[in-house]
Image (cartoon, rainbow, N blue to C red):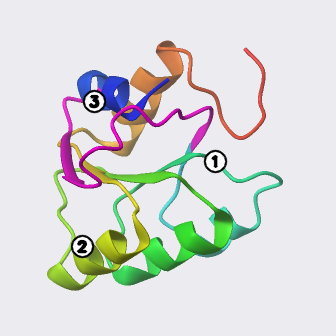
Amino acid sequence: MTISWVLEILDAELLTGQGAEGRELASACGSDLMSDVLCLRSAPNLLLTALTNPQCVRTAEMAEIAAICFVQGKKPPAETLELARRNGLPLLATGLSMFTACGRLFAAGLRCCGEGA
């Protein structure tokens, strides 16, 4: 699944990472606890979160996450946007809840960190 497809499925906006819409995403997870994300047995390609501070970008960098999607209509502050731009990390934003966003992605075939169908 590509970032472009995620944007469509979640009716999301691309905040940073223009040009990365073709990037492939094989797995996802939803979490607001970055420590939980770092403890996953395998890193997801897409992180869904309502956490908008720079820590989510730092976590993505450490865990080699390919993109972050903010849920619940949240938008990150300028500091988070700038850090993502410097790291080449695409940030997306959707008005959907975490539950609905994860459900839509699951229904479209995206799975969590190594889970099968």
Quadrant of the image occupied by residue 9: top left
User: Contact (CB < 8 A) between labels 3 and 2?
Assistant: no
Alpha-carbon distance for marks 3 and 2?
A: 20 Å
Q: Could you tell me residue 20's position as x and y percent?
A: 35, 43
Q: Could you tell me residue 63's position as x and y percent?
A: 66, 66
In this rendering, position of residue 112 left or right of residue 24: right
* Callout 2 crowding tier (Cα within 10 Å): few <14, some 14–19, many ≥20: many
In the image, the segment drawn in magenta is: 10-28
* Callout 3 crowding tier (Cα within 10 Å): few <14, some 14–19, many ≥20: many
**In the figure, 51 relative to 50: above or below?**
below
Residue 46 in view here: yes
Residue annotated with mark 2:
81
Residue 102 — which label?
Answer: none
Q: Could you tell me residue 12's position as x and y percent?
A: 21, 37
Residue annotated with mark 3:
10
Q: Nearer the viewer, residue 74 or 83?
A: 83
Alpha-carbon distance for marks 1 and 3?
A: 17 Å
Outermost residue, bottom direction?
A: 79
User: Residue at image x 16%, y 80%?
Assistant: 78
